[in-house]
Image (cartoon, rainbow, N blue to C red):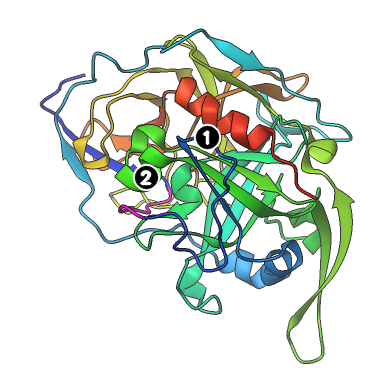
């Protein structure tokens, strides 16, 4: 790529972050058992509180966390260290999607593990629609089948130095025009523990823009509007996330040039104002990863990317290595982090992810061994 070309990048939720201190969140507490590079904090709400917060109306009105900021990045070349393993390659196999039904999109069977993440901005009035935000994410294999992989900027707002509130994950989310049941076919799973790398939390370093969230057992929710016009939830415990939809595998220290499927729920605008996606259904991209240019504004030196026109809302969606249509499983080897306009036509044409290395594995391992109810 021409290093002199103007490149516009933006986090796929649009949320720009600043440095922060763990423990600033009201009701959150750091885990004393986490390794030195791992920041873990408990969610502020109970699972029932977070689940009951997200009525159909609020989900429909949630938006990506966009900001009116200058996010352009000029020139630059990829770091020589970009995408290089810092140790032995490793992987954790996926678990099957028990009871799942195949959803087809052209020639690709969409994975039940992928869904939308909803949250509210910390320190904001949760009743204010401006606080209702979303990302993408995926169930990933863990010891207790309770783990979601997403981007760090989908769990932590370093602009306020706090983790997000009312954080839930809905696998196979579908905002259809039929019954409410179609929107949470496998239940809603509320965050219990957030796990991220301290270089993202403390240094705003998007080379560490990944997070793993331990969720509580899920609830199947049916909503009915009462005579007062308010939505009222009827909830039923449906058990662990991994038991219901399975979990993707995890891979780190892999070679750079791998063929990747990416999934997510894009909904934001291109820089030229075009809005090709609604965020109501899952979308996918496919390409061969390669090292991306450095982006000093985000401290990016080691991102990988490939051609894809995803917009805001797709952040946190998984990059799946060795994805199999028959089982709808593969190995998460990245997450949607930043959208790029590399040919200066005001259209996003690439997505990028941090390179998953030993640091990523440390965060994953801490989260994968954490139990929740």
Measure how far apart labels 2 and 1 are at the Cα level: 27 Å
- The reply to whether residue 37 is in sight is yes
Density class for disc 1 (Cα within 10 Å; few <14, some 14-19, many ≥20) is some
- The reply to whether residue 173 is in sight is no
**Residue 57 appears left or right of 287:** right
**Residue 59 appears left or right of 99:** left
**Residue 65 appears left or right of 241:** left
Up-down: is 65 above or below 150?
below
Prevailing secondary structure class for the magenta stretch in the rendered image? loop
User: x%, y% of residue 360?
Assistant: 49, 27
Identified at 67% across, 67% down, the residue is 54
Q: Which residues are magenta?
A: 13-20
Density class for disc 2 (Cα within 10 Å; few <14, some 14-19, many ≥20) is many
Identified at 72% across, 60% down, the residue is 177
Picture quadrant where residue 43 is located: bottom right
Q: Secondary structure at mark 2?
A: strand
User: x%, y% of residue 131?
Assistant: 48, 70
What number is the disc on residue 35? 1
């Amino acid at each position: 790529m021409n290093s002199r070309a103007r490149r516009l990048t933006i986090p796929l939720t649009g949320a720009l972050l600043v440095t922060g201190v763990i423990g600033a969140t009201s009701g959150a507490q750091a885990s004393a058992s986490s390794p030195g590079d791992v920041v873990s904090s408990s969610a502020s709400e109970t699972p029932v509180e977070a689940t009951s917060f997200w009525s159909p109306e609020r989900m429909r009105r949630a938006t990506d966390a966009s900001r009116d900021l200058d996010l352009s990045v000029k020139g630059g070349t990829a770091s020589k260290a970009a995408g290089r393993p810092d140790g032995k390659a490793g992987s954790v196999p996926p678990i099957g999607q028990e009871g799942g039904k195949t959803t087809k999109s052209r020639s690709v069977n969409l994975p039940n593990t992928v869904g939308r993440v909803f949250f509210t901005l910390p320190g904001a009035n949760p009743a204010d629609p401006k606080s209702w935000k979303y990302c993408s994410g995926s169930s990933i294999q863990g010891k207790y089948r309770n783990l979601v992989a997403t981007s760090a900027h989908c769990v932590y707002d370093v602009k306020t130095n706090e983790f997000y509130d009312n954080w839930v994950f809905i696998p196979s989310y579908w905002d259809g025009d039929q019954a409410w049941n179609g929107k949470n076919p496998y239940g809603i799973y509320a965050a219990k523990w957030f796990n991220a790398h301290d270089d993202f939390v403390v240094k705003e370093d998007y080379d560490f823009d990944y997070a793993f969230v331990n969720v509580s057992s899920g609830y199947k929710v049916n909503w009915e509007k009462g005579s007062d016009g308010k939505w009222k939830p009827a909830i039923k415990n449906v058990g662990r996330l991994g038991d219901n939809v399975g979990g993707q595998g995890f891979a780190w220290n892999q070679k750079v040039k791998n063929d990747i499927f990416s999934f997510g729920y894009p909904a934001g605008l291109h820089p030229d104002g075009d809005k090709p996606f609604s965020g109501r259904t899952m979308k996918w991209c496919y390409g061969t990863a390669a090292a991306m240019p450095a982006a000093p504004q985000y401290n990016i030196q080691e991102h990988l990317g490939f051609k894809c026109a995803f917009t805001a809302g797709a952040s946190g969606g998984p990059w799946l290595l060795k994805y199999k249509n028959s089982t709808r499983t593969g190995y998460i080897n990245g997450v949607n982090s930043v959208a790029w306009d590399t040919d200066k036509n005001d259209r996003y044409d690439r997505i990028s992810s941090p390179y998953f290395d030993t640091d990523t594995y440390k965060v994953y391992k801490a989260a994968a061994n954490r139990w929740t109810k």
